[in-house]
């Protein structure tokens, strides 16, 4: 059971990150674009990709919580013994904030109210890379 939950946890984490990596990449191109047809296409892409990202995120978190529930019912003091999990959950919280901010940006772009440069989005795009590296190292190496 544990391994099934873990497999689906990882599948939805990958789905979630596909969106968290590609949405800000579309923002980069959208912020540079002047052609009305291309801008309309970016808006559709952003809206659809955001839905997929919501689904991936919600299911990754649901399966993550089911893993905690599995461990809590099979190993006494699981939460106390695994400090890495607390740090990981803190970083996942930042990831959720980043995700929510992407949703705000999709709305702003949809209303033609973007105020930021493509250069700003290039840097913004690096945030989930750093979080991904840190979270995977915490989950796999379990350093504390
Ligand atoms: C609220 C969200 C999350 C919760 C509650 C959660 C919780 C967990 C738990 C309890 C495990 C099982 C560890 C074990 O069996 O030893 C696990 C495994 C894992 N998680 Fe998460 N997780 C969450 C989000 C994430 C995210 C965002 C990532 C990636 C960026 C991630 C990557 C992984 C990986 C790679 C494993 C497998 C580790 C291993 O056993 O080798 N998780 N997660």
Image (cartoon, rainbow, N blue to C red):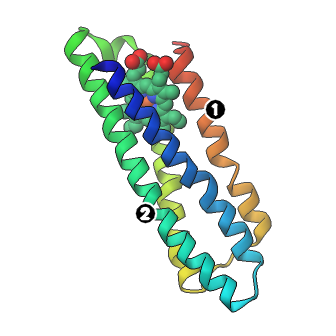
x 47%, y 55%: residue: 53
Name the mark on residue 51: 2
x then y, percent, for residue 84: 48, 20
Q: Give left or right: position of 4 versus 40.
A: left
Q: Is residue 90 visible?
A: no
Residue 56 position within the rendered picture, expressed as x and y whole percent measured from the top left = 42, 49
Q: Position of residue 26 (x, y in %)?
A: 66, 66
**Residue 101 appearing in the image:** yes
Q: Residue furthest bottom?
A: 36
Left or right, 50 with reference to 34: left
Q: Residues within 10 Å of mark 1 (few under 14, many from 20)?
A: few
Q: Nearer the viewer, mark 2 or mark 1?
A: 2
Residue at disc 1, secondary structure: helix
Of residue 107 and residue 93, the one placed in the foreground of this image is 107
Q: Secondary structure at mark 2?
A: helix
Residue 119 falls left or right of residue 97: right
Q: Position of residue 51 (x, y in %)?
A: 43, 63
Residue under label 1: 133
Q: Can you say whether 87 is above or below 2 in the image?
A: below
Q: Residues within 10 Å of mark 2 (few under 14, many from 20)?
A: few
State the quadrant of the N terminus. top left
Seen from the viewer's position, the closer of residues 47 and 74 is 47
Q: Quadrant of residue 59?
A: top left
State whether label 1 is within 8 Å of ligand 1.
Answer: no
Q: Which residue: 39% across, 26% down?
A: 6
**Residue at mark 2: C-beta within 8 A of ligand 1:** no
Residue toward you, 30 or 87: 30
Residue located at (67% from left, 89% from top): 37
Residue 122 placement: quadrant:
bottom right
């Amino acid at each position: 059971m544990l391994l099934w939950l873990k497999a689906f946890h990882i599948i939805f984490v990958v789905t979630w990150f596909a969106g968290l990596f590609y949405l800000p990449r579309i923002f980069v191109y959208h912020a540079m674009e002047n052609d009305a047809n291309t801008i309309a296409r970016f808006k559709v892409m952003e809206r659809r990709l955001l839905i997929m990202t919501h689904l991936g995120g919600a299911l990754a978190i649901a399966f993550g919580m089911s893993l905690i529930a599995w461990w809590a019912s099979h190993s006494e003091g699981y939460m106390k013994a695994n400090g890495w999990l607390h740090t990981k959950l803190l970083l996942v919280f930042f990831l959720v904030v980043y995700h929510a901010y992407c949703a705000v940006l999709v709305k702003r772009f949809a209303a033609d109210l973007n105020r930021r440069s493509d250069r700003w989005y290039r840097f913004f795009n690096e945030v989930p890379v750093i979080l991904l590296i840190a979270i995977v190292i915490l989950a796999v190496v379990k350093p504390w």
